[in-house]
Image (spheres, rainbow, N blue to C red):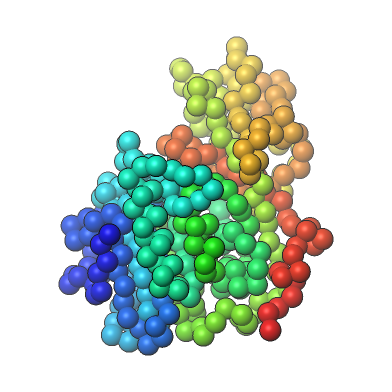
Amino acid sequence: MNILTKLPDGLLNLKANELHQMLNDHTLIHLQGIIDRPLFISLLQHGNETTGWEALKVFLNNYIGKLPRSLIIYFGNLEAARYNLRLLDGQPDFNRCWPGQYQIKNETAMQLAKITQAVQSMNPFASIDIHNNTGRNPHYAGINKLTPQFINLASLFSDTIIHFTSPDGIQSGAFASFCPSVTIECGMTGTADGLEQTITFLNNLIHLPNLNDVPGVAEHQEVLNIFSTVKIKPDIPFTIAEETPNAQFVIEKDLDRHNFHMLPKGTPFGYLVQGYQEMPLIVTDQIGQDITDHYFDIQNQSVILKQNVMPAMITQSERAIKLDCLCYLMRPFKREHKSEQFLRKTS
């Protein structure tokens, strides 16, 4: 495990696709601040999601030599970043290999288990994992626990908060057992508004003495729950917007415009090419059960919703769909399902 105690000379001048020139995958940099208890920041777990690094460069340039709080910076898949790819062919997804419910046995998982143990021993103040989306979404924060500190941390980034407990093996889930953690989704890579929002978030967070009482966070804060994942079956050839010779399923053009909107029953997600009848989608709940029949149907070759639902993270990238999923399905938490911890402020 490679832990540096200062920034290498010239590092802040590099773009994400140049970081491999100075750093290896899984490098940690521990920078001392006025407050010892560190903030953990995870970057580039997916090599083409670069807003985190661009924001951190601006942030660090503002605080060189005078950090209000110590930082531990984790640099993820720099080899994939070199080629502006989510991950390289044959690589596991780094953000599915952290310690979780299931024991993954590969080199990446073993390295991330060591990092988790090392960071836990440093008693982090909070953990931030910075990502981008490949489809149109509002900027939002994802949490794995419904407790006040998690809600407060997420609210510093966005009023749009989602709660999720799958997929397994994600960084924020691994760290949620020992510190408040959040995944922030900063929109599509390269957008100015995502960069500015991330910088503002870091600037606000670094000065906080604690996460028990954050100004502007109210008890009525809305939280959305991701309850299922929508994938395209691996044996179903698909395309987006228009038919190709081998496609069996065609995804609707601009489907990602529906992200974070409640869709009515009957909304089409795409259509089957004439001659094919097999349901191309598979929907699984958070414990892996197949619930496809509850949410999708085929009518006159169209694949449509069977009930009202809100999608998130619909992507228009064929590569992202194959590597991960088409989207997630969400619903608002009903008040009676919210924990008492969530509804009251800490003392």
Residue 37: x and y in percent read 43, 80
Q: Is residue 292 above or below residue 24?
A: above
Q: Quadrant of the N terminus?
A: bottom left
The answer to whether residue 301 shows anywhere in this view is: yes
Q: Which residue occupies the foreground of this view, 341 or 214?
A: 341
Q: Is residue 120 above or below residue 100?
A: below
Residue 139: x and y in percent read 54, 61
Residue 267: x and y in percent read 71, 36
Q: Quadrant of residue 44?
A: bottom left
Q: Quadrant of residue 69?
A: bottom left
Left or right of 29 on screen, residue 312: right
Q: Residue at x 47, y 84 (%)?
A: 207
Residue 335: x and y in percent read 80, 62
Q: Residue at x 19, y 61 (%)?
A: 22
Q: Quadrant of the C terminus?
A: bottom right
Left or right of 62 on screen, residue 283: right
Q: Residue furthest top?
A: 275
Q: Residue at x 49, y 71 (%)?
A: 126
Q: Residue furthest right?
A: 336
